[in-house]
Image (tube, rainbow, N blue to C red):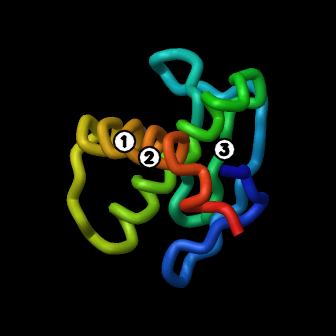
């Protein structure tokens, strides 16, 4: 999988940005999603595979929000890991 600069989720178009200094009260973050400005931030210091995994996690948040699924954080984490492994084990699934 690639990390594109923009990702559409229904009628939203998220801009994907790599940034340093990504943190909240709890410390450093791998990624963060901002629903209103439609931005997904990835920690620039993370390894490439970590960025992909984080991007999938944030995209599940994006789908959860726009389709009103009502996922809990733990469920987002598990689905993120599951999708990460799915694309890793089946690279042709998401290639053009
Ligand atoms: Zn999350």
Contact (CB < 8 A) between labels 3 and 2?
Answer: no
| Disc 3 target residue | 41
Give the crowd class for mark 3: few <14, some 14-19, many >=20 residues within 10 Å: many
Residue 71 located left or right of residue 62: left
Q: Evaluate whether residue 57 shows in this view.
A: no
Quarter for ligand 1? top left
Neighbour class for label 1 at 10 Å: few (<14), some, many (≥20)?
some
Q: Is residue 66 visible?
A: yes
- Would residue 77 appear left or right of 59 to someone viewing this image? left
Quadrant of image for the C terminus: bottom right
Percent x, y of residue 16: 71, 54
Q: Please state which of residues 14 and 53 is positioned toward the viewer in this rendering.
A: 53
Label pair 2/1, CB-CB below 8 angstroms: yes
Image coords of residue 18 (percent x, y): 77, 40
Of callouts 3 and 1, which one flags the residue occurring earlier in the amino acid sequence? 3
Question: In the rendered view, would you say 31 is above or below 27?
Answer: below
Disc number for residue 86: 2
Report whether 71 appears left or right of 38. Answer: left
Snapshot quadrant of residue 14: bottom right
Q: What's the mark number on residue 82? A: 1
In the shown orientation, is residue 85 left or right of residue 45?
Answer: left
Crowd rating for badge 2 (residues with CA inside 10 Å; few <14, some 14–19, many 20+)? few
Q: Which label belongs to residue 70? A: none
Image depth: mark 3 or mark 1 in front? 1
Q: Position of residue 87 (x, y in %)?
A: 52, 48
Which residue sits at x=52%, y=50%? 90
Q: CA distance from mark 2 to mark 1?
A: 6 Å
Q: Residue at x 67, y 62 (%)?
A: 95
The answer to which of marks 3 and 2 sits earlier in the sequence is 3
Tell me the CA gap for discs 3 and 2: 23 Å
Q: Secondary structure at mark 3?
A: strand
């Amino acid at each position: 999988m690639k990390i594109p600069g923009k990702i559409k989720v229904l009628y939203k178009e998220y801009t994907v940005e790599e940034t340093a200094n990504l943190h909240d009260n709890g410390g450093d973050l791998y990624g963060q999603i901002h629903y209103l400005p439609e931005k997904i931030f990835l920690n620039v210091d993370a390894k490439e595979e970590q960025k992909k995994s984080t991007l999938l996690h944030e995209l599940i948040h994006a789908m959860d929000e726009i389709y009103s699924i009502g996922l809990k954080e733990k469920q987002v984490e598990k689905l993120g890991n599951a999708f990460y492994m799915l694309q890793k084990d089946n690279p042709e699934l998401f290639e053009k």
